[in-house]
Image: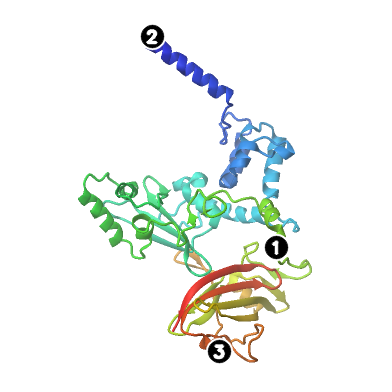
Amino acid sequence: MSRISCLLLFVLCFLLLTGCAGQRIRFEPRPTDPLFNEKTEFLNSYRYFVTENERKNGYLELDIRPFGLIDNPDELKRFIDYFLEIRDPNPNTPENEFKIEKEKLIAGIQNEVLFAQTGTNFEANGDFRGDMAHVYLFYGAPHQIEKAQNMSRVADLMAWIYFDVRGYPRFVFVFYDKFGYKLFKRYEGINTTEMYMERLREVVKFYPTSIDEYLEIEREISFNDQSGVFRFAIIYPNQFSYYSDIVIEGGNGKTRFGALDPPEPAALTAARYKPIIIGQPEDLSKRQFLYNRFHSFVPAKLNISKDNRPSFSLILNYEDVDWEIKDTVAEAVLDISISFQDKNTRATREFAVRLPIRRPRQEVELKIKGVVVNGLPASFSMNILLDDIQNFASGSESGATLKNLIDSLESGSEVMNVYLQHIVTKKSAGGWREEIIVK
């Protein structure tokens, strides 16, 4: 048998074997698909939220095929309806908050809400299929945008930064402009020379041919990086987040969180964690609230001044609080607890207070709308000093304050745990932990 005959036989066997194994299901519709327009409209909004299981299997329990195999309007409607239903974070309300929130973000992309920032244009950068739209649909407008532009060797760079409740950069999405902004994803965690050069090559205009050129690229990035964010992401320590267990994608759902992985549907998450939920809001249907945009979260920042003895203040944006309307007053009541544990002796001290925040209704309604500064939305915030607030933790002395507790701490390292929760809606800032030095 000739070599050509052997090759043809090999190819034929390969095709037969792969055919027997089953065809790969195409997720994106072709123009010839009878439901091309309907599927495209759905994918423009929710492409990045469809999980791998939904792509491969559809909803077997409801006899709904994978999205790519659906060829009739009724089955497509059932797929979309169930897709949205299991993502509703609060099925007890008539609205689907997930759908409402995403529709607002979709409108933001269509209306180019970030257009005032040079280069921040969704349509010119992949529109709904682009990396910028992916990030925006997941997390909304960035808290801060940094840029490095008009460099001789390096493409224009832009960073979208999202901070956590403590003010640390939870996500730093870096884009580089090569015929449209693309997302930088080279976070290897292993800083070999070759990997380092590959990172630099990804963001340059021309392929470097010598070590000196690589050094010039590094210097150019550093010189034009006023905030240090691009050095942090691209050069050193080559991290996507302040937290080492947060990666840009490829999380495992246990020890590593993937920021751009499709989120698990709310119904599945709730079912898994239902046994450990410790607080549910009472029936609030007859009470009037101005709710924040989050389903179970109160974004808050605890500002800690660390000159000798720590000083504490709570920072909240007006728009991030659930306000209960009581005639001409808007009210929010928060439970706050802060514990301090000496790292050496393990002795623990605790501060706790139920903090009522009351503001004129008219003021709150105005300030939750925010303002626009330099083309970006900005928020009004409250800075609540905690030092002189009375401590109501069990065992504390009558009239003692947080400052009194701090003054009683021995010098050294203290592990601080903070918890904050809205007493009515049960939304919380979660718990956060930090180590501080008391002098």
Q: CA distance from mark 2 to mark 3?
A: 92 Å
> First in sequence: mark 2 or mark 1?
2
Q: Amino acid at mark 1?
A: Ile
Q: Position of residue 258 (x, y in %)?
A: 52, 52
Q: Residue at x 40, y 47 (%)?
A: 180
Label 3 residue SS: helix
> First in sequence: mark 3 or mark 1?
1
In depth, the one of 253 and 323 nearer the eye is 253
- Residue 104 shows in this picture: yes
Q: Furthest-bottom residue in view?
A: 399
Q: Residue 404: which numbered mark, if any?
A: 3
In which quadrant will I find the C terminus? bottom left
Question: Would you say the residues marked 2 and 3 are in contact, meaning their CB atoms lie under 8 Å apart?
Answer: no
* Above or below 296: residue 393: below
At label 3, counting other C-alpha atoms closer than 10 Å, the crowd grade (few under 14, some 14-19, many 20 or more) is some
In which quadrant will I find the N terminus? top left
Q: Residue at x 30, y 48 (%)?
A: 197
> In the visual, does 290 lie left or right of 124?
right
- Residue 111 shows in this picture: no
Q: Which residue is mark 2?
A: 2
